[in-house]
Image (cartoon, rainbow, N blue to C red):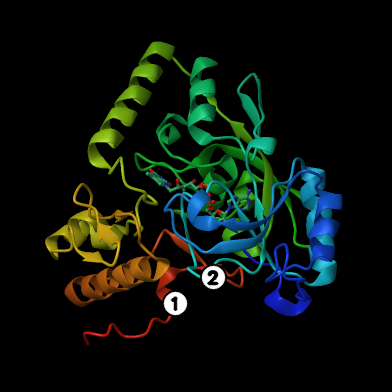
Amino acid sequence: MTATPDVLADTGGDGAIGSRLAGAGLVRDLQRIVPMGVATDVPLRRISRWRIGGPADVLVRPHSVDDIARLRRFLHRRGIAHVVIGSTSNLLFDDAGLRAVCIQIGAPLAYAAITGTRVTAGSGVWVPCLARRVMQAGLSGIAHVCGIPGTLGGLVCMNGGSQRQCIGTVVDSVTSVAVTGEVHRRPGRACGFGYRQSVFQDNGEVIAEVVLELGVAADRAALRREMLQILASRRRKFPQKQPNCGSVFKSNPALYDKFGPPGAVIETLGFKGRSIGGARVSETHANFIVNEGDATARDVLRLIQEIHRAVLAHTAHAMDVEVRFVRQDGHVGTPLDMKLPLPISL
Ligand SMILES: Cc1cc2nc3c(=O)[nH]c(=O)nc-3n(C[C@H](O)[C@H](O)[C@H](O)COP(=O)(O)OP(=O)(O)OC[C@H]3O[C@@H](n4cnc5c(N)ncnc54)[C@H](O)[C@@H]3O)c2cc1C
């Protein structure tokens, strides 16, 4: 999700802080807009879920919808590219890091208010916490997200979910901030929700607040048991210890009907345990790629592209990738678009 492609238009760093993208002047301007919310030269491998990525020149953590709006207006006027991230559970960052301004939505926007069956929540709220609160309030409809590590903004952008459900079905409205800084409120039906799809993946808007319309749970204890079962099953099925970004490839009904889910297809083709550099196809679940400690983005991209090619050759189905790649210029897209040099062995 980028504002403009001419990332480097405003460079001219002084070699001290955020030197590649931002001169001290830009950092001071950002600090005026979001006091106490700007960091420079942040190693993405330290903050990203996959523990991969070079340094982000400038990272801003807004505290309110107003902060986001002022920030976007400023960056738009100056023509400076920026990218929005949540908790990075679905993102692979470039080994070269990030030359665009990185806006991270998190704890400062992590509020939630429940009135009757309506939940109004900030996009920074941690999804498993929200699912638990909703259950405790006796409401049903989001039990399936109780084990999904991420922010509500990231979940809505990805239309994530589990148990063959998606968050979009219970979204009443979304407040978002356009690239120019205008604030919009969109009803759920106008959010373009499809399987792991939403308008926010393409329109560049930052999700600031989400209203969910939920049901009343017939049996709160049963709902709690259901959530505990979901969590236990995820612990059994998914790798727990090594950094990963969840399912790499999206499920596809046509592929599923003929060959099974992506994990089963990848396993059948012998990829379980296959590694490139420090990236390995998980032994626990073949649709997960784990970082064994020193994986680079390039290792992961190679593995993704190799699996994609093999599945296409074997099944004639081109799998979509769920994980999104953040290029150093701030462009967020599919890892399949990245052109990689051929491996030396070929
Ligand atoms: C162990 C593990 C298990 C997982 N299991 C599941 C699962 O069962 N189901 C599932 O759907 N996903 C799953 N995921 C993937 C991931 O957790 C979800 O996609 C999650 O919703 C991403 O949230 P995030 O805050 O980390 O977003 P990020 O990964 O930071 O961002 C994801 C996308 O959303 C955009 N984005 C983030 N915040 C905002 C915002 N406020 N406004 C606009 N755009 C925004 C980003 O630009 C990016 O394109 C799993 C991941 C892991 C690591």
The image shows a total of numbered marks equal to 2
Quarter holding the N terminus is: bottom right
Q: Which amino acid does label 2 sit on?
A: Arg
C-beta proximity under 8 Å, tags 1 and 2: yes
Q: Residue at x 54, y 70 (%)?
A: 327
| Image coordinates for residue 325, horizontal then vertical, percent | 48, 65
Determine which quarter of the picture holds residue 12: bottom right
Q: Residue 22 versus residue 16: which sits nearer the camera?
A: 16
Could you classify mark 1 by the number of other residues whose Cα lies within 10 Å: few (under 14), some (14-19), or many (20 or more)? some
Q: Is residue 191 left or right of residue 237?
A: right
- Which residue is denoted by mark 1 in the rendering? 338
Q: Which residue is drawn at 54% across and 37% down?
A: 170
- Which residue is denoted by mark 2 in the rendering? 327
Lower sequence index among marks 1 and 2: 2
Q: Which mark is residue 11?
A: none
Q: Does the residue labelled 1 lie within 8 Å of ligand 1?
A: no
Could you classify mark 2 by the number of other residues whose Cα lies within 10 Å: few (under 14), some (14-19), or many (20 or more)? many
